Amino acid sequence: MHEEGVLKEYAIGGAIATIYYTEPFATNDVDIFFIPPEEQGLLVLTPFYEFCTQAGYKTYKEYILIDETPIQFLPAATELEKEAVQHAVPVTYKNIQVNVLRPEYLIAIFLRVFRLKDQEKIVRLLEQTEIDKNLLSDILTRHGLKEKFENFTGER
Amino acid sequence: MKKVVAKNEIDLEKYRQKLFKTKETYRKEQARLSFEQKIEIVMKLNRFARGWRKA
């Protein structure tokens, strides 16, 4: 999709991106963040949908099923998510280059969503990977998440 | 693995701490696997979980 220009700015987020930096753990789906292209002032939220169905992939609700793996394409809705996609790191997976969100942005995104499973991923990232503390602090400050982060890490 | 005997609760707690430390080391080692290896493990975990749910 990326090569054919269907999905230009994208990055893997969620659990799979977390797993890139931490020990592997079970997860059901793959989250791909993308910056939605604009057409006549409208944001196109599913630029890949037609491509996938024409390529023979099945769909289930908002998921696209590739083999048995459900993939959800999430339009980057906030400035934080857009910035995260733009600063993703290229990673090689089976000779294919994919973009993966940086751990500092993952922490910020998980902090914003903040379900229990997001909190768990924040802990994994903080414990198991090298975090650029200056970058994290900068992201959290600019996106109004610093206090929430301090409260969260202070409670632990 | 050696036979471990606990004489009292302190010994038991020491052994438990040792287990947690091993667990921590193992997790860190797993974190250093390649992305491909990790995804393989995730897929196996998912297959395992699906099989379990069906059982």
Image (spheres, coloured by chain):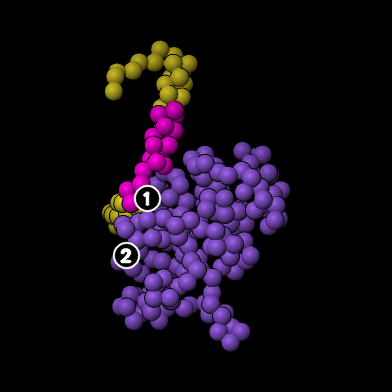
Chain colours: A purple, B yellow
Answer left or right for A63 relative to A146: left
Image x and y of residue A28, in percent:
40, 58
Mark 2: amino acid: Glu
For marks 2 and 1, give the one nearer the viewer: 1
Q: Which mark is residue A149?
A: none
Q: Residue at x 62, y 49 (%)?
A: A135
Q: Is-magenta flag for residue B34?
A: yes
**Vertical position of residue A43 compared to residue A82: above or below:** below
Main SS, magenta region, reads helix
Q: Residue at x 62, y 66 (%)?
A: A78
Report whether residue A118 is seen: no
Image x and y of residue A155, in percent:
65, 39
Instruction: Decide: few, some or many residues near mark 2? Use Cα within 10 Å; few <14, some 14-19, many ≥20.
Output: few
Q: Nearer the viewer, residue B11 or A28?
A: A28
Instruction: Decide: few, some or many residues near mark 1? Use Cα within 10 Å; few <14, some 14-19, many ≥20.
Output: many
Secondary structure at badge 1 equals helix
Secondary structure at badge 2 equals loop
Q: Chain of mark 1?
A: B
Q: What range of the chain is rendered magenta?
A: B20-37
Q: Quadrant of residue B51?
A: bottom left
| Residue occupied by mark 2 | A68
| Residue occupied by mark 1 | B35
Figure quadrant of the N terminus of chain B: top left
**Vertical position of residue A137 compared to residue A28: above or below:** above
Image x and y of residue A15, in percent:
46, 54
Distance between mark 2 and mark 1 Cα atoms: 19 Å
Q: Quadrant of residue B4?
A: top left
Report whether residue A143 is seen: yes
**Vertical position of residue A71 compared to residue A115: above or below:** below
Question: Of all residues shown, which one is farthest toward the top?
Answer: B7
